[in-house]
Amino acid sequence: MTYPILNLSKTLTHLDLLAMKQRGEKISCLTAYDASFSALIDAAGCDVILVGDSLGMVIQGNSTTLPVKIEDMIYHTRCVTKTCKRALVVADLPFMTYDTLENAAKNAARLIQDGGAQMVKLEGAKIEIIEFLVAQGISVCGHLGLLPQFIHQLGGYKVQGKFADAAEKLLADALEIQNAGATMLVLECVPAELAKQITEKLTIPVIGIGAGKCCDGQVLVVYDMLGISTGKRPRFSKNFLTDTNSIESALKNYSIAVKNGKFPTEAHSF
Ligand code: KIV
């Protein structure tokens, strides 16, 4: 097993992630919601920590992400940024907190000023909102494919972009999000071939979850990859704790597997 050399002396920026894409180096990302996991994930060499609104499910025990409030996100983002030294921290804007330009700017500012996040993530091709946030100096990560905040419209946690028209729309949306000034994109639950095309077309890093091995990086919900989430583990995830006896090495093995292109395999893809 080859261990990548880590530069633990500075906090990564979106420019470092861009340079990694350009060099063909994979980006590893995990979710975290508290100071202890943040420190462990950071020390394991993950490049990005996502304070996802998945906390509504794995921390708060809800069946969707919809009940998560901006105060919850600020609280958990602040816990994470207190102990994260190297990884870039991205925080989710929760459901209905970016319904207008003013709300988006106000709530993104709270995640940055009160939470300490470097970038905010929002779901869907909200082009005007992204342009507005970028114009205020806020770094934005887009999120396309399966959008958990749209779960009632989608009718379930299903693979998106399977048919030609939906695939074309996803590619067009991804380009528009990039043109609006987003500096990263998360692609969730889309066919691996479509994710490959989008990753090749975009100049910004594309981080996949259930989107195959050709994305520039991978993200998983940390509780899923440690096998401690309640309910069924999604097909695209893998329990990294089964092959080792410590959380630290499970996190490190995940980051290495992403960087060496060993995760995800076809078994974790659509
Ligand atoms: O909320 C979250 O954890 C996410 C990831 C699943 C990408 O958005």
Image (cartoon, rainbow, N blue to C red):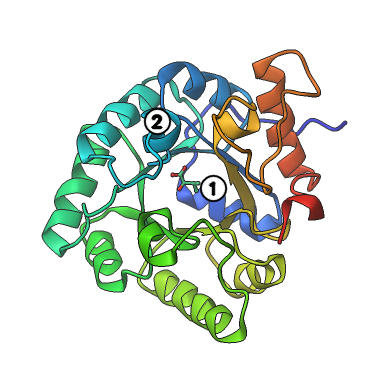
Q: Position of residue 69 (x, y in %)?
A: 23, 39
Q: Which of marks 1 and 2 is nearer the N terminus?
A: 1
Q: Residue at x 33, y 28 (%)?
A: 76
Using the image, determine if residue 52 lies above or below residue 33: below
Disc marking residue 95 = none
Task: Give the residue furthest to the right.
Answer: 1
- Residues at marks 1 and 2, CA–CA distance in whole angstroms: 35 Å
Counting other residues with Cα less than 10 Å from the Cα at mark 1, is it few (<14), some (14-19), or many (20 or more)?
few
Counting other residues with Cα less than 10 Å from the Cα at mark 2, is it few (<14), some (14-19), or many (20 or more)?
few
Residue that carries the numbered disc 1 in the rendered image = 16
Q: Which amino acid does label 1 sit on?
A: Asp
Q: What residue type is labelled 2?
A: Gly
Indicate left or right for 102 with 194 as reference: left
Label total for image: 2
- For residue 91, which quarter of the picture? top left
Residue in the foreground of this view, choosing between 236 and 73 = 236
Disc marking residue 61 = 2
